Image: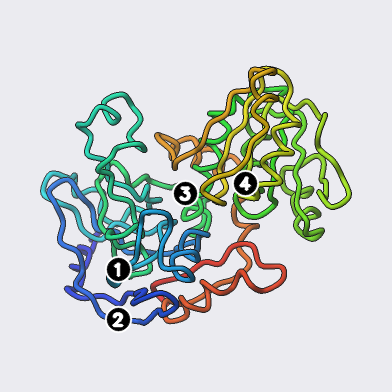
Amino acid sequence: MTTTAPLAPPTTMRASVLRRQGEVVLDTLDVPALDDDQVLVQVAAVGVCGSDVHYYQHGRIGPYVVDHPLVLGHELSGRIAAVGKDVDPSRLGQRVAVEPQRPCRTCAQCKAGRYNLCPDIEFYATPPIDGAFAEYVRIQNDFAFDIPDTVSDEAAALIEPLSVGIWACERAGIRPGSRVLIAGAGPIGIIAAQAARAFGAAEVHITDIAQDRLDFALQHGATHALNPRTDSVEGLDVDAFIDASGAAAAVRSGIKAVAPAGKVILVGLGADDVELPVSFIQNREIWLSGVFRYTNTWPLAIQLVADGKVDLDVLVTGRFGLDQAEDALNAGRQPGQLKAVVYPGK
């Protein structure tokens, strides 16, 4: 049997570029050149994250400012189209899920295993690093993870937000029998609920003001649904509270739902400063932490999806070609939308 060698990738590619706040254009860019330890990935699917929308609408997130054209998108899957000289060429053609960051690997945080806190990390779609609303991206070989044929391109792309949920559950100490409260039944909240159940949580309470999202969450991970307009969570005495809303009121009430020695994990992006019930936290010795991305989560995330313990495909509610990236960024404004996915090959 004869095999045909993969075609060499082109020298230019299409990319959807955030030219300035509120303006996205389709452009032609050079295909990125590879370092010796990198692979070139032909992008199959890219999920739209809330941070992409925030950059599009506001032109900045905290200290990160879009002051030059930027390619958005950091939730991605694809197929390896070329390899650097130090990479085994047998990887050509493999389907992969990409961990979209490049730590320095030499600083104190990296050496301690906390490479997500590397001060010099390069993260896709975070100025000035381009992301994946493009036909090709490059990444270090060990951050391109093989995915089984049973995992779709869309689910492989959403390994990235699942990694956020896994990292939150790990930091929250979720284990078999845990009781968990999650604020926000958007994509991250529902993913966190599924991850918590996969970790063995016996109860997953989720809150949102949108009834359709609560109904969806009950079908995909949550065991109890509460609307903060009518239901109070204070006094639930859960083992862990994960905020995926960024809403100050949800954070404050969620903390008061935590049992003594419980944990509070802040995932959602909200105001820079929030008033907290400090005496409650002190008197109950509640452990409070933020979450900043993730470390070493891709293998577990892929396994959970492959084993059917987490369903990511069900989150996809909008599909767009690369020339429709701006529509994808606006899709969340429509009722019933959860996760938009961009397909750079279309």
Mark 4 neighbour density, 10 Å: few (under 14) some (14–19) many (20 or more): many
> What residue lies at 22% left-to-right and 64% top-to-bottom?
6
Q: Which circle's residue, 2 or 4, is located before the other in the chain?
A: 2
Q: Amino acid at mark 1?
A: Asp
> What residue lies at 66% left-to-right and 67% top-to-bottom?
337
Q: Amino acid at mark 2?
A: Asp
- CB under 8 Å between discs 3 and 4: no
SS state under label 4: loop
- CB under 8 Å between discs 1 and 4: no
Q: Which circle's residue, 1 or 4, is located before the other in the chain?
A: 1
- Front in this rendered view, residue 4 or 89: 89
SS state under label 3: helix
Q: Nearer the viewer, mark 1 or mark 4?
A: 1
Disc 2 designates what residue? 27
- CB under 8 Å between discs 2 and 4: no
| 58 in relation to 122, above or below | below
| Mark carried by residue 67 | 1
Q: Amino acid at mark 3?
A: Glu
Residue 302, visible in the rendered structure: yes
- CB under 8 Å between discs 1 and 2: no
Q: Please state the horizontal and vertical placement of residue 273, each as a whole percent of the image.
A: 54, 45
| Mark carried by residue 160 | 3
- CB under 8 Å between discs 3 and 1: no
| Mark carried by residue 244 | 4
Q: Which circle's residue, 3 or 4, is located before the other in the chain?
A: 3
Q: Nearer the viewer, mark 1 or mark 2?
A: 1
Q: Amino acid at mark 4?
A: Ala
Q: Is residue 142 left or right of residue 155?
A: left
Q: Please state the horizontal and vertical placement of residue 180, each as a whole percent of the image.
A: 71, 32
Q: Nearer the viewer, mark 3 or mark 4?
A: 4
Q: Which circle's residue, 1 or 2, is located before the other in the chain?
A: 2
